[in-house]
Image (cartoon, rainbow, N blue to C red):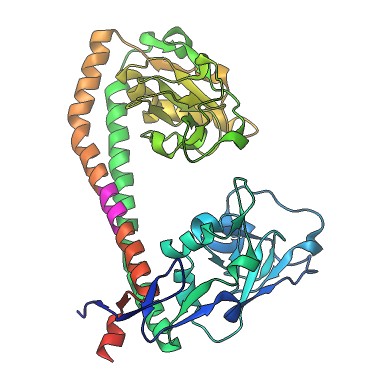
Amino acid sequence: MAKLTFNKLKTTEAIWLPQVPEHWELLKVRHLFKESTKKGFPNETLLVASQQHGVVSKDAYGKRTVEATKDLHNLKLVEKGDFVISLRSFQGGIEVAHERGIISPAYTVMKETRQIEKRYFKNLFKSPPFISLMTLCVKGIREGQNIDYPTFKNEYLPFPPLEEQQAIATYLDKKNSEIDKFIRNKERLIELLEEESGSLRDSLIKDLPIEIWKKLKYIRRFRNGYAFKSDLFTAGEGYPVIRIGDIANELDLNTCAKYPVNQKVDKRYEVKNGDILIALSGATTGKVAQVDKLTDKAYLNQRVAKLDNGEPYLLLCLSSLIIQKQIILIADGSAQENISNKDIENLEIPFPKKETRDKIVTEFFQRNNPLKLAIEKAKKEISSIKEYREALITDLVTGKRSVPQLQMS
């Protein structure tokens, strides 16, 4: 198989892209694209910009979003193949439209003004170096930020010969397909291993006598979180605030929003190592996690419950399929997918004597450890292949390396 080789590079005046291949052009955005502001198409499909799926219809997106119901004639028209700058482009780049429709007037719609290979620019616009450029073009201070298009349109973009754009895009299509298949297989393996781990939990508690089942409120103290002001959340310095979206099998405090250290918070809403957390609403309803590796303060947001100083048995029990099914039944019975403080307090779980609880936990860890290690290995492999893909795309769209097709020609 032909290998990627390095191109001969020349220095550029672009801050975000100091070098490109000697035979590539470097053009300003306004010489490749123009802004489109067409409006007055209220009957077109409503679109949403997603970092994962691109610009798609709200129905195809599937997730709950705020939907415009009036003044639809003020929304911008988007044609299939257009590029759209959203309020999240400073984080995830520019999205390509997969269908025709209308979108928020706060977004910028871009159309090419000369012949290009759109697949090449789709990859370029999602590459880390390009996203670093977008962060230099933002205006406003808010959770979602607008890109200042008058500034952006005067920035430089690499412009390889059209044949080379096509070769790069075709090569990346093939590689992305292979990588996506690899990730799907690993994710399926993780699902199967987690199912086996869940079945193991169930097998250890399902035959415990009904007489020892107790309500949670008689086992541990229960407390809900606080309604923090989200406009004070930052991604930088501060104490972690654990929200419902952060609750998974493992809790990563590094990815939590941060709350300013100079803001006073009641100690009741602080969490400690050993606390067990339960998501009370949203897509993660009923999910549990245990706080560990905490070296400083961390806070509990609203709609997340905590059981003080939960022992390992409680985490094992609450994350079992038997108890999770109970929680799902409670959540399904409500108007929205959520459970209340009272629901958690009245949740019944098997709670034998401490000697039995410790024995169950010991057996679980012994039998589950190989499954846990296999899951961790698969997750690392997924992370590694994603890093490889990111580096591959960056090297090719910026011209650091040349694709095999071009080398052979």
Q: Is residue 399 left or right of residue 369?
A: right
Secondary structure mostly seen in the magenta stretch:
helix
Please name the residue shown 72% across and 61% down the image. Answer: 105
Q: Is residue 346 visible?
A: no
Rendered view: 357 above or below 54:
above
Where does the image place residue 123, in percent across and percent down from the top left? 44, 70
**In this picture, which residue range is highlighted in magenta?**
378-385
281 and 380: which one is in front?
A: 380
Asked if residue 353 lies in the magenta stretch, the reply is no
Q: Is residue 180 left or right of residue 281?
A: left
Asked if residue 380 lies in the magenta stretch, the reply is yes
Rendered view: 171 above or below 283:
below
Please name the residue shown 21% across and 16% down the image. Answer: 359
Where does the image place residue 126, in percent across and percent down from the top left? 46, 64
Q: Residue furthest bottom?
A: 409
Q: Is residue 378 left or right of residue 132?
A: left
Rendered view: 8 above or below 333:
below
Please name the residue shown 25% across and 89% down the image. Answer: 408
187 and 240: which one is in front?
A: 240
Q: Is residue 322 visible?
A: yes
Where does the image place residue 340, in percent across and percent down from the top left? 58, 22
The C terminus lies in which quarter of the figure? bottom left
The N terminus lies in which quarter of the figure? bottom left
Q: How many marks?
A: 0
